[in-house]
């Protein structure tokens, strides 16, 4: 599977933005999908993931209640709806795919084997 993320841009604090990640290739439905981000000078961190097995979603504490991950299997696309954005959300956002499905696996970075290019989200104060 190959991934292409888009939808980043400049948004004011308190605003909303939706990222999209289009997947191509076979067996897309057998991959869990996730979003990660990397802020300047920081390590890449998990933002939100969705298990392909049971559809459960997991979020980092920093985005819980503000971000929503969803996927459209017919369109082979996963989305990240972001609201109440703050400058701390400024980062390059990456979508990723994993053949694993459990919470313990999906919260482990090494389980994510396919990466798309990043899309930059900048939140101004």
Image (cartoon, grey):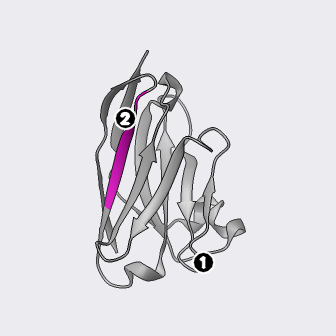
Q: Residue at x 47, y 29 (%)?
A: 40
The quadrant holding residue 21 is bottom left
Q: Main secondary structure of the magenta part?
A: strand
Q: Residue 22's spot in the image, x, y percent?
A: 29, 64
Answer left or right for 58 relative to 99. right
Q: Is residue 70 magenta?
A: no
In front: 30, or 13?
13
What's drawn in magenta, residue-wise?
Answer: 15-21
In front: 15, or 62?
15
The Cα–Cα distance between marks 2 and 1, rounded to whole angstroms, is: 29 Å
Q: Is residue 18 magenta?
A: yes
Q: Residue 7's spot in the image, x, y percent?
A: 28, 45
Q: Answer few, some or many: residues within 10 Å of disc 1's Cα (few below 14, many 20 plus, some between 14 and 19).
A: few
The quadrant holding residue 119 is top left
Are dots 2 and 1 in contact, CB under 8 Å? no
- Residue farthest to the top, as pictured: 125
Q: Residue 68's spot in the image, x, y percent?
A: 51, 51
In the rendered view, tell whether residue 108 sits above or below residue 84.
below
Q: Residue at x 67, y 73 (%)?
A: 102
- Image quadrant for the N terminus? bottom left
Q: Which residue bears the numbered disc 1?
A: 54
Q: Residue at x 53, y 26 (%)?
A: 88
Q: Answer few, some or many: residues within 10 Å of disc 2's Cα (few below 14, many 20 plus, some between 14 and 19).
A: many
The quadrant holding residue 55 is bottom right
What SS does tag 2 mark? strand
- Mark number displayed over residue 121: 2
- Residue farthest to the right, as pictured: 104
């Amino acid at each position: 599977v190959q991934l292409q993320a888009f939808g980043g841009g400049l948004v004011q604090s308190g605003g909303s933005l939706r990222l999209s990640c289009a997947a191509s290739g076979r067996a897309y439905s057998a991959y869990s999908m996730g979003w990660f981000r990397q802020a300047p000078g920081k390590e890449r961190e998990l933002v939100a993931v969705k298990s392909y097995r049971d559809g459960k979603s997991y979020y980092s504490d920093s985005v819980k209640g503000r971000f929503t991950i969803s996927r459209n299997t017919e369109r082979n696309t996963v989305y990240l709806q972001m609201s109440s954005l703050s400058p701390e959300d400024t980062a390059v956002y990456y979508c990723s795919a994993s053949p694993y499905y459990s919470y313990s696996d999906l919260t482990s970075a090494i389980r994510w084997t396919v990466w798309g290019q990043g899309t930059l989200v900048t939140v101004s104060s």
